[in-house]
Image: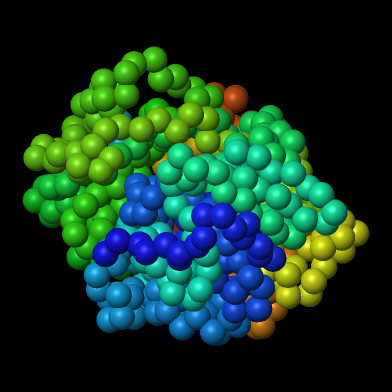
């Protein structure tokens, strides 16, 4: 189904309260909620739906925010998208994937994957009790297109294939000019929300500069979509690995294959399309080759991973490998006179642990609160620079800890628990009706101290020769540190790296 844009007179200037730039899921959800609040809204999109995009793995936090937005702004379809079961019932034509949790498997160059009955080389962390209440992997071309159609149905003005050429602030209003189909049009609005998920727009029109400085993590991704790729569970069972006590099928999860260069994500959708990306740790490796050559070179060194792609072909869209460039970025300001950048536009760290969708929705929820309370002066601004910086710093330390501990899988597993204790803390707060003022409770000083101390210790271990005995001692320290934030038995040796449910009941 093609997206039908709203009609307009070519000779008129469109006047609205808010212009949202970017029609990914965050931009369209923000626009719809603002419309339900009574604001007049226009959305500008330089591309055309459906279009390829990544950032596909949802989490319990994202699901909780979707349900809150659904109820707060009378958008019932958002609630149906917050669980796999209701998504399949109400939107079976919008492709998604079943995501039961997070799965991690380490690999060594030139060696076939190995583990044992104690699952010493496997880590499966469930985030739901069953398929019905599970998270989802979003095929973004379908999901974003669906939400863009909903925007138009609600009466929001949406202009696709429209390139903003200028934006001037005058007398408390923005005058935007954009080109579409060879013609120039104008929008006048009080506020602009940058929902592009990139630094380009805010840099060009608001003078906000983006930089990777200050991040511990240094990574980039080479990614694409495949069809006819093999299933990891099939590989494990065919090679007689013990999977009888698995809490879920690892193909129905955010599947992480850890490699010496970094890690590989594998996210599967219901149409059996597989999203795959090699994330390279540039603190220890570089990419010198052409992308397809780099892909083939990396995959060929890990025989168990290579087996998955024996019969795989690139999907027609995108039909090629794409390189992200360095992933870490942060703007030097998140708002100004009449403009705001959503959190995923302000900054990004890395796709490890799937924080992207939840962080984007957290940013949407915060900016909506600002418009609801009509707090627009700098002194009242809810989207404080300090909060955003704390959030990115927390994500960075968690992700960096995992990268640094990769050579010792047991220590890596301990580092992963930093993400789970922060997410569980956040979820528990929301269930009590207390929405934390920072993502992953980045304002909790005691929790942050645990993350920062552990990151520092892992960094020292990595630099001092990666001694296995020192790693075991550090694992014990981490187990004690997270104990006050660990109501679900994380790092319990009796569980043998198989966690049947860690998220709170949602």
Residue at image point 60% right, 25% down: 463
- Taking depth in this image into account, of 87 and 162 the one nearest to the observer is 162
Residue at image point 33% right, 54% down: 50
Q: Position of residue 68 (x, y in %)?
A: 57, 79
> Would you say residue 24 is visible in this rendering?
yes
* Quadrant housing residue 303: top left
Instruction: Looking at this view, name the residue that lies furthest to the top.
Output: 288
Q: Position of residue 34 (x, y in %)?
A: 62, 72
- Taking depth in this image into account, of 158 and 262 the one nearest to the observer is 158
Q: Is residue 211 above or below residue 377?
A: above
Instruction: Looking at this view, name the residue that lies furthest to the front.
Output: 11
> Would you say residue 352 is visible in this rendering?
no
- Taking depth in this image into account, of 454 and 506 the one nearest to the observer is 506
In the image: residue 187, left or right of residue 385: left
Residue at image point 39% right, 37% down: 263
* Quadrant housing residue 484: bottom right
Residue at image point 45% right, 64% down: 7
Count the numbered circles shown. 0
Q: Position of residue 434 (x, y in %)?
A: 70, 78
Quarter occupied by the N terminus: bottom left
In the image: residue 337, left or right of residue 103: right
Q: Is residue 71 above or below residue 403?
A: below
Q: Is residue 472 above or below residue 379?
A: above
Q: Position of residue 236 (x, y in %)?
A: 17, 51
């Amino acid at each position: 189904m093609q997206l039908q844009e709203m009609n307009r007179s070519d000779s008129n200037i469109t006047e609205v309260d808010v212009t949202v730039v970017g029609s990914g899921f965050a931009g369209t959800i923000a626009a719809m909620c603002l419309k339900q609040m009574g604001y007049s809204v226009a959305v500008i999109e330089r591309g055309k739906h459906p279009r390829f995009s990544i950032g596909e793995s949802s989490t319990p936090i994202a699901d909780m925010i979707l349900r809150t937005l659904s109820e707060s702004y009378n958008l019932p379809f958002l609630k149906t998208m917050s669980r796999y079961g209701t998504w399949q019932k109400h939107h079976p034509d919008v492709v998604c994937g079943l995501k039961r949790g997070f799965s991690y498997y380490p690999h060594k160059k030139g060696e076939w994957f190995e583990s044992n009955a104690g699952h010493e080389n496997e880590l499966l962390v469930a985030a739901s009790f069953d398929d019905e209440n599970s998270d989802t992997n979003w095929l973004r071309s379908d999901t974003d297109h669906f939400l863009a159609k909903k925007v138009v149905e609600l009466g929001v003005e949406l202009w696709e294939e429209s390139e903003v050429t200028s934006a001037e602030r005058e007398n408390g209003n923005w005058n935007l000019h954009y080109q579409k189909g060879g013609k120039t049009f104008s929008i006048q609005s009080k506020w602009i929300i940058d929902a592009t998920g990139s630094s380009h727009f805010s840099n060009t029109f608001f003078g906000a500069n983006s930089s990777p400085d200050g991040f511990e993590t240094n990574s980039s991704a080479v990614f694409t979509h495949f069809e006819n790729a093999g299933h990891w569970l099939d590989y494990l069972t065919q090679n007689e690995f013990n999977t009888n006590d698995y809490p879920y099928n690892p193909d129905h999860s955010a599947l992480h294959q850890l490699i010496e260069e970094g890690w590989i994500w594998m996210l599967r959708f219901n149409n059996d399309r597989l999203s795959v990306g090699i994330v390279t740790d540039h603190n220890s490796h570089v990419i010198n080759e052409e992308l397809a050559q780099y892909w083939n070179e990396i995959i060929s060194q890990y025989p168990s991973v290579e087996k998955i792609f024996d019969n795989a072909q690139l999907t027609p869209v995108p039909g090629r490998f794409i390189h992200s460039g360095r992933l870490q970025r942060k703007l030097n300001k998140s708002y100004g006179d009449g403009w705001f950048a959503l959190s995923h536009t302000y900054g990004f760290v890395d796709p490890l642990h799937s924080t992207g969708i939840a962080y984007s929705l957290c940013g949407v929820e915060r900016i909506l609160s600002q418009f609801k309370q009509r707090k627009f002066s700098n002194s009242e601004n809810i989207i404080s620079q300090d909060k955003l910086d704390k959030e990115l710093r927390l994500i960075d330390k968690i992700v960096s800890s995992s990268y640094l501990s990769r050579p010792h899988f047991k220590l890596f597993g301990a580092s992963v628990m930093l993400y789970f204790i922060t997410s569980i803390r956040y979820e528990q707060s929301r269930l009590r009706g207390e929405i934390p003022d920072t993502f992953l409770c980045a304002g909790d000083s005691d929790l942050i101290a645990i993350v920062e101390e552990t990151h520092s210790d892992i960094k020292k271990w990595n630099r001092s020769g990666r001694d296995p005995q020192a790693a075991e001692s550090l694992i014990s320290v981490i187990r004690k540190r997270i104990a006050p934030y660990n109501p679900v038995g994380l790092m319990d040796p009796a569980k043998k790296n198989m966690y049947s449910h860690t998220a709170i009941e949602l």
